Image (spheres, rainbow, N blue to C red):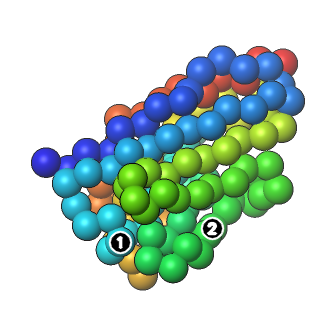
Amino acid sequence: EVQLVESGGGLVQAGGSLRLSCAASGFTFDDYAIGWFRQAPGKEREGVSCISSRDGSTYYADPVKGRFTISSDNAKNTVYLQMNSLKPEDTAVYYCAAVKSGSYWVSGGVDYWGKGTLVTVSS
């Protein structure tokens, strides 16, 4: 059974930090890029960041560049998203996702989804 299990969401004040974790199982980790989408109330789901399990290459959406850092522990099949300097506009449900290596990081191309974890940033 394929599983992507997120943890680490919560409530934080603006300027604070959180670290999200995504533990993957049930598929070949090295064949996928793993990362995060987010969806704020009333908005479309958007890609945030991803990392290739194969070569470690990373992608960041413009709104999070310089503030978020994605990393991967292939021995644990786990991906982390360190979020610093959080802003109220980062408030959203964050979904872990897996996309076959070589595919575009867009919600329509996701092969597997986690259930999501809520991040709330207060002003």
- Horizontal and vertical percent for residue 111? 29, 61
Instruction: Categorize mark 1 by other alpha carbons within 10 Å: few (<14), some (14-19), many (20+).
Output: some
Numbered mark located on residue 30 in the image: 1
Question: What amino acid does circle 2 point to?
Answer: Tyr
Q: Position of residue 42 (x, y in %)?
A: 56, 32
Name the residue: 22% across, 61% down.
27
Q: Is residue 82 above or below residue 29?
A: above
- Give the amino acid at mark 1: Asp
For the residues labelled 1 and 2, the Cα–Cα distance comes to: 17 Å
Q: Position of residue 115 (x, y in %)?
A: 35, 35
Q: Residue furthest left?
A: 1
| Label total for image | 2
Q: Does residue 83 appear to the left or right of 55 in the view shown? A: right
**Marks 1 and 2: which is nearer the front?**
1
Horizontal side of 116 relative to 122 (left or right) equals left
Q: Please tell me which of labels 1 and 2 falls first in the chain.
A: 1
Q: Can you say whether 116 is above or below 36 in the image?
A: above
Q: Residue at (33%, 45%) from the top-left corner?
A: 4
State whether residue 48 is above or below residue 88.
below
Disc 2 secondary structure class? strand
Circle 1/circle 2 CB separation < 8 Å: no
Q: Is residue 42 visible?
A: no
Q: Give the numbered dot on residue 59.
A: 2
Circle 1 sits in a helix, a strand or a loop, which is it? helix
Relative to residue 8, is residue 2 depicted above or below?
below
Residue drawn at x 49%, y 52% as measured from the top left: 79
